[in-house]
Image (cartoon, rainbow, N blue to C red):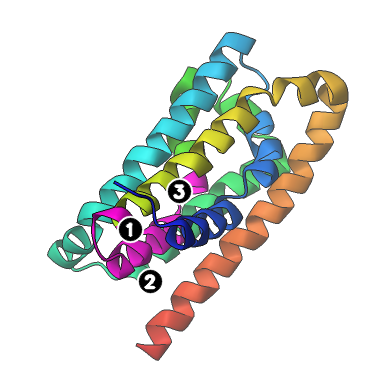
Amino acid sequence: MPIDVPIFLSAFVTLFVIMDPPGAIPIFLALTRRLPPRAQRAAARRASLVALVVIASFAVFGQRILDYLHISVAALQGAGGLLLLIVALQLLTGEESEQHADAGVNVALVPLGTPLLAGPGAIVATMLAMQRAQGGAQVASVFLALAAVLLITWLTFRYAGALLRLLRESGIVLLSRIAGLLLSAIAVQMIADSVRAFIEA
């Protein structure tokens, strides 16, 4: 089955910008810096796989799930924003290290896999791309773009340990505070967009 290159590029660029793998490195390091290298690699792999399963599931069944539960996209976006805000506050106060010190690779499920990677933005973007796709080639192109972005994300997280060795503990602490500030701004923006959508509905 041939791949629709314009559809692939459009979906790839959109998802890459939304998930922003390089921008997620400080958050990944802040949440996994207490883990041994092997557990860090497992967390990178599991977070990418979780994001792939969640986004792909919503791409296929998302609208049916939301309709059945009577949940709007705005509500999903608001919930994701609140969850990210909690994580951001933990990064800013330094509580994430205590909370996740014994969490093992479970940190890959929440908040790394979802809602950081498989957040409302990525879910909605994939759902819209699937709705616009016509024919098997375009559907395959959307899924291939999703897989490519998450492959890059996995590689980015997989080799983030080199950055950890370069910056050392003090540098990662500083980086985690900056990441917390940026993540809180993203969370507030998500909540604001959700409120705006409810008002305009």
- The answer to whether residue 160 is above or below residue 87 is above
Q: Residues within 10 Å of mark 2 (few under 14, many from 20)?
A: many
What is the three-letter code of the residue carrying label 2? Ala
Name the secondary structure under disc 3: helix
Q: Quarter of the image holding residue 27? A: top right
Chain part drawn in magenta: 115-138
Q: Which residue is mark 2?
A: 74
- The answer to whether residue 82 is above or below residue 73 is above
150 sits left or right of 183 in the view? left
Q: Alpha-carbon distance for marks 1 and 3?
A: 11 Å
Q: Which numbered disc, 1 or 3, marks the residue that appears first in the sequence?
A: 1
35 sits left or right of 131 in the view? right
- Percent from the top left, x then y, of residue 120? 43, 59
Residue at image coords 29%, 71%: 72
- Percent from the top left, x then y, of residue 90? 63, 42
Considering the image in quadrants, where does the C terminus appear? Answer: bottom left
61 and 28: which is toward the camera: 61
| Residue 36 visible in the picture | no
- Percent from the top left, x then y, of residue 56? 31, 46
What is the three-letter code of the residue carrying label 1? Gln
- Percent from the top left, x then y, of residue 200? 40, 89
Name the secondary structure under disc 1: helix
Q: Which residue is mark 3?
A: 145
Q: Alpha-carbon distance for marks 2 and 3?
A: 25 Å
85 in magenta: no
122 and 148: which is toward the camera: 148
Kindly report which numbered mark, 1 or 3, lies closer to the viewer in this rendering: 1
The disc placed on residue 138 is 1
